[in-house]
Image (cartoon, coloured by chain):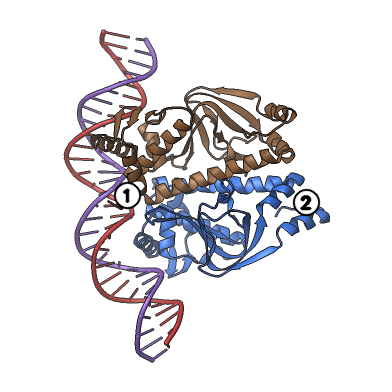
Chain colours: A brown, B blue, C purple, D red
Amino acid sequence: MPLGFTNQQMQKIDDVVKIRRRIKQGELLFGNGDTFTSLFAIRTGFFKTSVSTEDGREQVIGFQMAGEIIGLDGIVNDLHSCNAVALEDAEVCVMPFANIETLSREFPELQRHIHKIMSREIVRENSVMMLLGNMRAEERLAGFLLNLVQRLHARGFSQSEIILRMTREEIGSYLGMKLETVSRTFSKFSDEGMIEVKQRYVHIIKPDALKKIFNLQTCD
Amino acid sequence: MPLGFTNQQMQKIDDVVKIRRRIKQGELLFGNGDTFTSLFAIRTGFFKTSVSTEDGREQVIGFQMAGEIIGLDGIVNDLHSCNAVALEDAEVCVMPFANIETLSREFPELQRHIHKIMSREIVRENSVMMLLGNMRAEERLAGFLLNLVQRLHARGFSQSEIILRMTREEIGSYLGMKLETVSRTFSKFSDEGMIEVKQRYVHIIKPDALKKIFNLQTCD
DNA sequence: TATTGTTTTTGATACAAATCAACAATAGTC
DNA sequence: GACTATTGTTGATTTGTATCAAAAACAATA
C-alpha cells in the first residue's frame, strides 16, 4: 500500500482491508463463472491462476505470491473468468471492489495505485505473450526462474535458492510446454552447472548464464 | 462511452476527448520507452501493438480497431512498454490520463468504465495466453479469424468477409507461428472449403467448422 | 508498360518438443 | 514399516512446425 495518508485516511483504507480469509492448499479462492465482488490481496501463501478450454486443457496464466492482487479479471463482467487455487495454505484480504471504487474517488493516491496495479498486470501478460510466442523451452524456463527468484528476493527470501510451490506440470502449463520438457530442461541446466535441482528445491548457481539464455538466445 | 450523463457532465467528458491526432499507415503512435501521458481512443483505422526482445524478435500482442483504447501499458511506470503502429491511416482521440483520473473521481460511471476497460484487456490477454500456450496452428488461426469477424461485425461490417489489415508475418507473430505456417493453414482451410482466401481478402464460408476447430480440437 | 520490392504461396528438409512408455523418488495413508 | 498415489526423471520415437529455398502474385514507382 502506498504511503502519504493521514491517520483518518488510513483508518478508512484499513476498513476496506480488514476482512481476512484463509484458504487451504488445493482450495479454490474463486473460479470461472463465480460472481465477482472483491479483489484479493495475498497476505501469505502462493496461488496459481488458470483458464480452461471446453475440452479440459488448462492454461496457467500466473503464479501469485504475498503482496500481489488477484481477481482483476472479474471487474469487466462482474464474473470471474479464471480460477485461483492456493498452492500452499494461504491467507488473503478480501477487498470489496465497490468499497475500493468509493474510496479511490476520495483518495487520488489510492486511485492511482489501483490503476498501476491493473496496468502492471497488463504489462506482465505482455511479456508472458512474448515468452509463449517467441521463445524456446530453455529461454522460457530461464525466464521463469529468474522472474521467480527476483520476486522472492524482493520479499526478503534468498537470491539463489527457491522451493517451488508448483509441479512440473503446472510450470509447463504456464510456459506452454509439457512436463517432460520442463523436467528435461531442468536436467540440462543442472548438467551444465547453472543450477542445482532436487525435486522442488532449485539452487541458482550461475544467474548470469540464465540471463544470457533468457535474453540473447541467438547470440553466442 | 457509457450513457447516463447530464449535458454538463457530457461537456466535461467531451473536453477530455477533444484533441485528435492523425496517424499515417506505418507510423508509430507511441513506442517502447516513450513517456506516457495519454490513453488513445481509436476513432478510425487499425493498429497493431507489439513488444520486442533485445535481439530483435517482435511479438505482436494485439490488433486494435475503432472504439478500442490503447496505451494502458504506460500507466504503471509512466513509460510505454510496447509499440503501437498504425496498419492503415488512422485517427485517435488523445485523452490525457491525468484528466481521466480527475474526471473519474467525479463520475463513478466513468470510473467504472475505465476499470472495465482495463479488466477487459487483462481477460483478453488471458485468452491469448491460452491460445499461445495450448493450441495448435489450426486452432490459433481459427480463433483469430473468429475473433476478428466478431469484432468487425459488432462495428457494422460483414459477418463473413474480412479485408485483413496485417501481413501473414504479423498474424504469425501474434499467433506464435511463422508466416509460412500461417499461409499453409489458410490454404488448408481453403482446400477444405471452410474459407475463401485471396491475399488479404478472407471469406468465411463455414463459421461453424471454424468454431469446431477452435474449441473442441480433440473431439471428432 | 516495364521494373523493383514486398508479400504470399508452395515444396523439401530439419529439428525441437510432444508423445508414449517405463521406472524412480517422494509423500501420504493405513 | 508396508502400501498406494502422486510427482518427477529419462529413453525411444513421432510429429507439428520451423527453416531453407524458389517461384508466384501483387503493389509501388518510374
Question: Where in the figure is residue B34, as x and y percent of width and height?
Answer: 54, 56
Task: Please report, as a chain letter, where disc 2 is located.
Answer: B
Q: Which mark is residue A217?
A: 1
Instruction: Kindly identify which residue carries mark 2.
Output: B4
Compared with B45, A214 (above or below) is: above
Question: Where in the figure is residue B40, as x and y percent of width and height?
Answer: 62, 58
Nearest to viewer (mark 1 / mark 2) = 1
Residue B12 seen by the camera: yes
Give the residue type at disc 2.
Gly
Determine whether, in the image, residue B27 is placed left or right of residue B55. right
Q: Which mark is residue B71?
A: none
Task: Please report, as a chain letter, where disc 1 is located.
Answer: A
Q: Nearer the viewer, residue B198 or A106?
A: A106
Asked if badges 1 and 2 are on one and the same chain, I answer no
The quarter of the rendered structure image containing the N terminus of chain B is bottom right
Element at label 2: loop
Residues at discs 1 and 2 in contact (Cβ within 8 Å) = no
Question: Where in the figure is residue B28, as x and y percent of width and height?
Answer: 53, 63
Q: Residue at x 73, y 48 (%)?
A: B102
Determine whether, in the image, residue A176 is placed left or right of residue B119. left
Determine whether, in the image, residue B123 is placed left or right of residue B9. left
Compared with A131, B96 (above or below) is: below
Compared with A191, B5 (above or below) is: below
Element at label 1: loop
For marks 1 and 2, give the CA distance: 53 Å
Q: Residue at x 47, y 42 (%)?
A: A54
Q: Quadrant of residue D29?
A: bottom left
Crowding at label 1, few (<14), some or many (≥20) Cα neighbours within 10 Å? some
Give the residue type at disc 1.
Gln
